[in-house]
Structures are given as structure tokens and as C-alpha cells.
Image (tube, grey):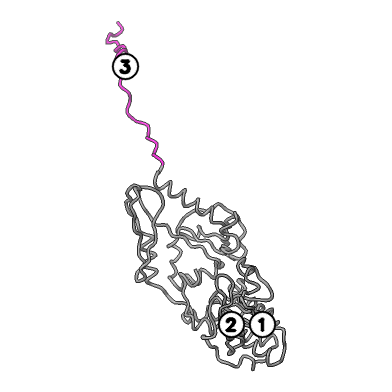
Amino acid sequence: MDHTLVQYHIPNLYKLIHKMMVDNLVQQGFPRSVFDVAFDPSLVGKGLILDLDTGDLIEVDSDGIVTSARHGTSHILSPKEIDQRYGRHRQWGYFELLEKQQRHPNFAAFLTHFDVPVQHVCSLLVDYYDKMTWHRYDFWPKVMKGFIDNFTASLFRDNKGAFFPELQKNPKLYIIPRPRVLSWLQTLKNTQKNRAPDNGASTKGTAIPGEGKEKGEGLGRGGIRTTKLFLVTNSHADFANFLMEKTFGKEWRSLFEIVVYYAKKGRGFFSTNADFIKVDAKDPHKSSLRVKPKLGHTAECSYVEGNADTLTRLFQEHSQQTRNPPKPTPAPSSTQPAPSSSSSPPSSSSSP
């Protein structure tokens, strides 16, 4: 959802997160003068890694080879310096852990727009540590505290921290309305075509306006071909609803057959059989009732956690029912049966 359906004004978002982190680190005891430098977006980028053994921000290729490095805010390492620091083959020592998505106290990977601006803060801290001749770059736990103090999910509900209150107060500064994408989603939702039986011929989906991409439609062979939209996000229900409403309007939920919040996509949604939990309307963070999921364009068909296998089967069952609806049972006839030919006619004689 974030940075896909929901788009942010990235320059404004970066400045907010940078200021949020600086203020938090000052509260933890760092001198304000350490950060008395304007945020420089040219010094940050997705995919960079902070090596806390060396204080370098490094870039590695798909084999774990260090291809470039910068120490602090200004010192770009030469090829010779990279060889001296990381060895002749430049193999980064923690690459295997990174591939397995495992954390380690000696490095930090910046992979999303929510953590990328903090690279600049870390570079300023490296410069500060070098100036103080402190040879252990041990500031990362305090940076992590800054993330926790501002990005913990319940802070949105409680309107606490520095990030969520500012986002809720000035959403137009940070969240981009997307009417063209809304129109496209509505078109997909309402798509219904007669589909020829599968004979190997290719069929085209619906193009995203202005983007030239196509999406497939429906499931199954023959019959009515329809498009089913669903949303699976790692965000909690209250925050996701806020973002989607600011992006697509208050009726956004009617676009999707099912919505799954806090799906833990990188930690179980695609690899476990976690139950679907019904969203608690009063406090989504306290949702606990395990249920069997169903489809529908209402908030009733919104869940927490769940798993991909069950969701796939749910759509397959729905597709099967759409293609082969149960035949109605014929109603009993109200017409009286005709008399049998062997029946004797009533007597016409009367008693004397």
C-alpha cells in the first residue's frame, strides 16, 4: 500500500523524518550542533547499508561485493581505500545475514522511504564520532530508539510522537490524492466480460491510465470474466484507513473484495497458516476474534493477519461458484393430476 497505491510527497516526507530523528537524538543527549546542517537528499538513497564496524555507508552488488563507499558526509572512498578496508575481493562480511534478512548490531540496511532520510543523520554522527576520536560507532541503539519513539503503530491511535501527529495535522503536505488511479480501480472493479472457453488464445487485461501497464482479470475457464480487487498491507487498520481515505476518499473500502491489515508479509503471510482475525471496530490494535474470511465490499470483510494460501482458496471457491452456480430446485406443481382411465365414473342413479 505505502508507496504503491498510496504515494507521498517524498521531499516533504524526508524532511519530516529527518527532523523527527534529529529532535529525538538531541533529547537523548547529543549536542544540537552535531546536526546543525541542512538535510541533503543527495547523500541518501534506498539500498545503502551502514557498516558500523567502519562507519561507512556502502553499496553492495548481488554477490555481496562492495561497489562504493562513503565515510561520513563527505569522504568518498577511492577504489584503493575500498580494497584496503574490505579486502582485495571486496566481499562484505555480513552479506549472508543480509540475504537472510537477519539483523545484526554491526550493520543497518536502509530499504524504505521511512528510513532512508536517517542515513544523513547517521553520516553526521560518524563525522561527530571521528571528531571526538571515538573509534566505536555505537550510536545505532539510540537511532533505533528514535524509530520506536515515533513509528510504533499504537502512536497513530494515541496521536503521540512526532511523525503521526504531523501527518494527521497536515495530510496534504505529505499524501498525494490519486483521482486517476481511483478511476482505474473503479473501472477494474466494474469489469465484467463474457469470456470464451480457454483455447490457448491470449487475452489482454485493463491498462492503468497513463501508465501503460496491464492487469489480468478473473479466474477460471469460460463463462463470465470478472475482476476481483483485494488489498493486503502490513499497516494497522487505523493508519491504513487514514492513508487510503486521504488518497481515494471516504468510500475507498468499496473498491476491494477483502482487505487484510497487519499482514506481516515479510514474516509469515506467505509462509504460515496464520488465522484471519476480525478487525475490532473500537480498537483495531486489540483485534483478537478468529474467523473464517469472506468476500464483500464492506468493512465487515476486513481482517488482521491471515495467510496467502487461505486467501487464494477463498478466491478460487468464489470463482468456481461464479462459473457454476447451483441449479435452482424446481417448485412442486399446483395442478391436480387427471383421473386414471381405469377409474369408475361416479354413479348417476339415485336412491328411491
Could you say where residue 156 lies in the image, as x and y percent from the top left?
A: 58, 74
Which of the two discs, 2 and 3, sits closer to the camera? 2
Look at mark 2 in the image and give the residue it sits on: 69
Q: Is residue 71 magenta?
A: no
Q: Gap in Å between the C-alphas at discs 1 and 3?
A: 104 Å
Q: Are marks 1 and 2 in contact (CB under 8 Å)?
A: yes
Q: Which quarter of the figure has residue 266?
A: bottom right
Residue at 72% in and 84% down: 136
Task: Say which amino acid is labelled 3.
Answer: Ser
Image quarter hosting the C terminus: top left
Look at mark 1 in the image and give the residue it sits on: 54
Task: Say which amino acid is labelled 2.
Answer: Ala
Residue at 63% in and 68% down: 96
Q: Which mark is residue 340?
A: 3
Q: Which of disc 3 and disc 1 is earlier in sequence?
A: 1
Q: Gap in Å between the C-alphas at discs 1 and 2?
A: 10 Å
Q: Is residue 91 left or right of residue 293?
A: right
Task: Say which amino acid is labelled 1.
Answer: Thr
Residue range corresponding to the magenta coloring: 326-352
